[in-house]
Image (tube, rainbow, N blue to C red):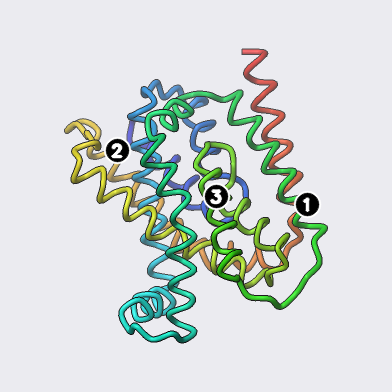
Amino acid sequence: MGILEAIILGIIQGLTEFLPVSSSGHLEIAKFILGDNSVPEESLTYTVILHFATALSTIVIFRKEVFQILKGLFQFKVNDEFMFSLKIVLSMIPAVTIGLLFEKELESFFGGKILFVGAMLLVTAVLLLLADRAKTTNKDVSVVGSIIIGISQAIAMLPGISRSGATISTSVILGVDRNKAARFSFLMVVPLILGKIAKDLLGGDIHISSQEMIPMGAGFAAAFIAGLIACQWMIALVKKSKLIYFSIYCAVVGLIAITYTFLS
């Protein structure tokens, strides 16, 4: 992978991470179009690194909320901060469980499986359509709701299923306020990405050759900067816009990906 391709993928990750359109799905499609022949493990490693970059940009944008989560965990008092932190922790359990038990199976879905990505984008489109028709309320995320949203996040580990789309849609369908749903969605992924990076580094699962370091570094920087610039704008767009527009977009891209696979 060249530096230019890495930067393009980084920008795509930075832009699509904060919209309910599946950043991992877009990365797989982009890598396929750019002719990236990475094996599934290498493809997934690069995807995780780019997600790490946008996780860092999320921490910068939501630094006050991240501090509140950490504060809530170590106060050992049952207050609003502790309950919010507890919900974040509970939301992580399904994805952590699936990630640990089925890591190799998940890797097999990456690395040019464009037909599968297209099909999963259609699933994302349906989820967003259902959420668009849900009633608007002022409810907070409940303890049980955080677990259900966490299950959606676990399913969204598949490329093409939008993580933010699945979690925000699930939240809205459960009756959670859209602003609160978006905030919870973007914060709940941060510890998962950081945990994944730590696990892979400690376990020696991330193998980056000297030739890959510069392109991956360029992609990481591009994703981080694009995430910083786009985060607030994208979040505001998610809050204010109707999810039907993103549903249509995912459906169109999914159908294009499927058609391209059969015609290529």
Q: Residue at x 69, y 28 (%)?
A: 256
State how far apart marks 1 and 2 are (Cα). 39 Å
State how far apart marks 3 and 2 are (Cα). 20 Å
In percent of width and height, residue 11 lies at 46, 47
Q: Quadrant of the C terminus?
A: top right
State how far apart marks 1 and 3 are (Cα). 21 Å
Query: Residue 1: in sight, yes or no?
Result: no
Q: Earlier in the sequence, mark 3 or mark 2?
A: 3
Helix, strand or loop for disc 2: helix
- Which residue matches tag 2? 215
Q: Residue at x 55, y 51 (%)?
A: 151
From the viewer's perspective, is the residue at label 1 or at label 3 nearer?
Answer: 1
Task: Say which of 220 and 71 sits in front.
Answer: 71
Amino acid type, label 2: Pro
Circle on res. 37: none
Amino acid type, label 1: Leu
- Which residue matches tag 3? 16
From the viewer's perspective, is the residue at label 1 or at label 2 nearer?
Answer: 1
